[in-house]
Image: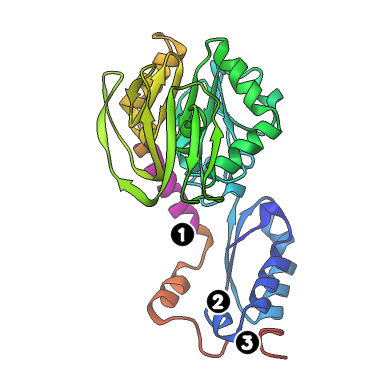
């Protein structure tokens, strides 16, 4: 599947096949073009060329639809994420860490009316935010250093000192604490220990064994659930209260739970907590909306892709006589 919205889709398709070894080339039976804008007639010469160059058919062209937002697979999918429609009542700025992970933690916020969810990489983008979110990361210590190198730490501290809400999730929560230690070198140099932002009386130490669990609990008077996948072990000090496997102090929240904002009742309770009891939340559940998006995508595929051919590939595999392109053919 090639994303034409990013440009260079035909070069990417041809180059990807050609650079694979012969055995792997035999697994690629054809292509689908995704996110096409405009008249497909204008695209036809390109479709004909890629079929001729690779000896593989294009099974369909999916049109661009701004209302089809599925769970992000990688950080590139965060570019151009949607803002809420209608009048903005609350701007939520999510810091786009270099090694950001579990991006879907904030997807559920995007369904609420009046919320403008943006991804930020510089302090200016945080200056007018009502809420700042520090998301999960695959490299907490390195991303904390990046945060400081860009002056984002000062922006977060100024935001919090003004009494504005901050939410840290997993690695983002660990950054909000007093210290992060890596005695065994799980993330990098053994024995490393760095200061956190100091907004929460919390200390983190990484261990080799990864925590994997599906926690449930109560917060803000609502049931909450999520999942944990991390190396960090958290120690809470006296200056915080427990919050979803993490800690809270005033308007600063930290949780080790991914996915908790997907719970409609908890998400809306948290929004009223940070925006005021009169904040008007939506009525459509996140699960319901996600199902609608999947149905819409299924309809688009049915209308624009040769589904019978794809089902045949699933049942019988790729044809045995596919062309092998150089240099993967050994020449």
The segment highlighted magenta reads: 288-301
Tell whether position 139 is magenta: no
Q: Which mark is residue 237?
A: none
Secondary-structure class at tag 3:
loop
Contact (Cβ within 8 Å) of mark 3 with mark 2: no
Residue 159: percent from left, percent from top: 59, 16
- Residue, x 63% and y 26% (percent of image)? 153
Task: Determine crowd level at label 2: few under 14, some 14-19, many 20+ residues with C-alpha closer than 10 A.
Answer: some
Distance (Cα) linking label 3 and label 1: 28 Å
Distance (Cα) linking label 3 and label 2: 10 Å
Q: Is residue 19 above or below residue 120?
A: below
Q: Quadrant of residue 26?
A: bottom right
Residue nearer the viewer, 165 or 30: 165
Decide which of tag 3 and tag 1 comes sooner along the chain.
1
Residue 98: percent from left, percent from top: 62, 44
Distance (Cα) linking label 2 and label 1: 21 Å
Residue 169: percent from left, percent from top: 45, 34
Tell whether position 289 is magenta: yes
Q: Quadrant of residue 1?
A: bottom right
Question: How is the rendered protein coloured?
Answer: rainbow
Q: Which residue bears the numbered disc 1?
A: 302
Q: Which residue bears the numbered disc 3?
A: 323
Horizontal side of residue 40 vs 107, given as left or right? right
Q: Is residue 217 above or below residue 240?
A: below
Decide which of tag 3 and tag 2 comes sooner along the chain.
2
Q: Which residue bears the numbered disc 2?
A: 28
**Can you see residue 180?**
yes
Q: Say which quadrant the C terminus sits in.
A: bottom right
From the image, state whether disc 3 or disc 1 is nearer to you: 3
Task: Determine crowd level at label 3: few under 14, some 14-19, many 20+ residues with C-alpha closer than 10 A.
Answer: some
């Amino acid at each position: 599947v090639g994303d034409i919205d990013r440009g260079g889709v035909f070069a990417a398709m041809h180059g990807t096949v050609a650079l694979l070894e012969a055995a792997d080339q035999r697994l690629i039976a054809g292509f689908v073009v995704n996110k096409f804008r405009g008249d497909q007639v204008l695209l036809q010469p390109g479709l004909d060329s890629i079929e001729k160059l690779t000896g593989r058919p294009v099974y369909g062209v999916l049109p661009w639809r701004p209302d089809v937002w599925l769970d992000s697979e990688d950080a590139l999918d965060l570019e151009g994420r949607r803002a809420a429609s209608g009048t903005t009542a609350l701007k939520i700025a999510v810091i786009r860490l270099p090694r950001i992970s579990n991006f879907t933690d904030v997807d559920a916020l995007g369904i609420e009316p009046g919320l403008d969810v943006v991804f930020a990489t510089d302090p200016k983008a945080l200056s007018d935010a009502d809420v700042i979110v520090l998301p999960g990361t695959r490299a907490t210590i390195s991303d904390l250093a990046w945060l400081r190198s860009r002056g984002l730490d000062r922006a977060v501290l100024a935001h919090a000192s003004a009494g504005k809400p901050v939410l840290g999730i997993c690695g983002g929560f660990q950054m909000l604490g007093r210290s992060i230690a890596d005695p065994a070198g799980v993330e990098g140099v053994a024995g490393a220990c760095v200061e956190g932002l100091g907004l929460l009386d919390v200390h983190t130490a990484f261990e080799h064994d990864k925590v994997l669990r599906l926690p449930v609990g109560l917060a803000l008077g609502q049931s909450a659930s999520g999942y944990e996948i991390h190396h960090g072990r958290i120690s809470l000090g006296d200056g915080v209260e427990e919050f979803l496997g993490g800690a809270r102090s005033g308007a600063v929240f930290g949780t080790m739970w991914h996915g908790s904002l997907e719970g409609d009742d908890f998400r809306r309770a948290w929004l009223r907590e940070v925006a005021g009891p009169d904040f008007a939340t939506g009525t459509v559940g996140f699960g319901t909306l996600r199902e609608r998006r999947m149905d819409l995508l299924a309809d688009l595929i049915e209308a624009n892709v040769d589904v019978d051919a794809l089902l045949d590939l699933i049942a019988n595999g790729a044809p045995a006589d596919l062309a092998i392109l150089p240099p993967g053919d050994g020449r």
